[in-house]
Amino acid sequence: MRVPTELTGTRVTRTAFDHQVRLSFTGHEPDGRVRVDGELLVETPLLLTDASGRQALLTPGSGVALAPLLGLFARTVTGVQVTGAGALTLDFDDGTLLRVDPDADHESWALTGWGIASVLVGPGGEPHGWH
């Protein structure tokens, strides 16, 4: 399974949420040119683990309960994994981990943008659309 390693070294440039969670990522070449401008869209619960190991299960659409995601703003992605039927894990430079597992009934996450392969993890898992 292809892993979107292009996210490694990008920074979270926007956090937004309503009934979905959206994280925007931007990465630059050494000369300043943009190499990645992507967005992660999460539609199902996600697990956020801080550097101390404290975990928070966050559900899109839950309002202020999503506030811990604001701490990802300006953080740098240091690692990316996609395992099993499309479980996504992002590691950040402050030790935070974000994990989104596939959902049996709903699309769980999608990644789109420039400089990165698009993917959609649909109901039941298994990434679709790796370009």
Image (spheres, grey):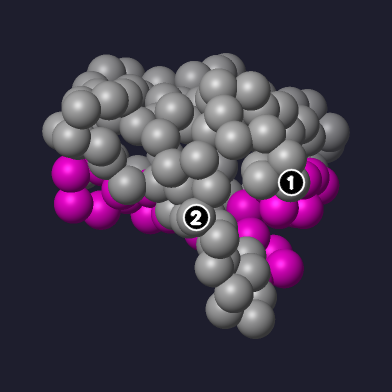
The answer to whether residue 24 is visible is: no
- Secondary structure type for disc 2: strand
Residue toward you, 28 or 104: 104
Residue toward you, 43 or 39: 43
Asked if 58 appears above or below 61 in the picture, the reply is: below
Asked if 64 appears above or below 14 in the picture, the reply is: below
Q: Amino acid at mark 2?
A: Leu
The answer to whether residue 114 is visible is: yes
Residue toward you, 37 or 12: 12
- The x and y percentages for residue 66 are 66, 43
- The x and y percentages for residue 17 are 66, 27
- The x and y percentages for residue 18 are 64, 23
Asked if 53 appears above or below 110 in the picture, the reply is: below
Identify the image quadrant of residue 13.
Answer: top right
Q: How many marks?
A: 2
Identify the image quadrant of residue 7.
Answer: top right
Which mark is on residue 57? Answer: 2
> Which residue appears at 55% of the width and 22% of the height?
19
- Secondary structure type for disc 1: helix
In the shown orientation, is residue 120 left or right of residue 68? left
Instruction: Bin the neighbour count of mark 1 within 10 Å (Cα to Cα): few under 14, some 14-19, many 20 and up.
Output: few
Which mark is on residue 67? Answer: 1
Magenta region, residue range: 68-95
> Which residue appears at 38% of the width and 54% of the height?
81
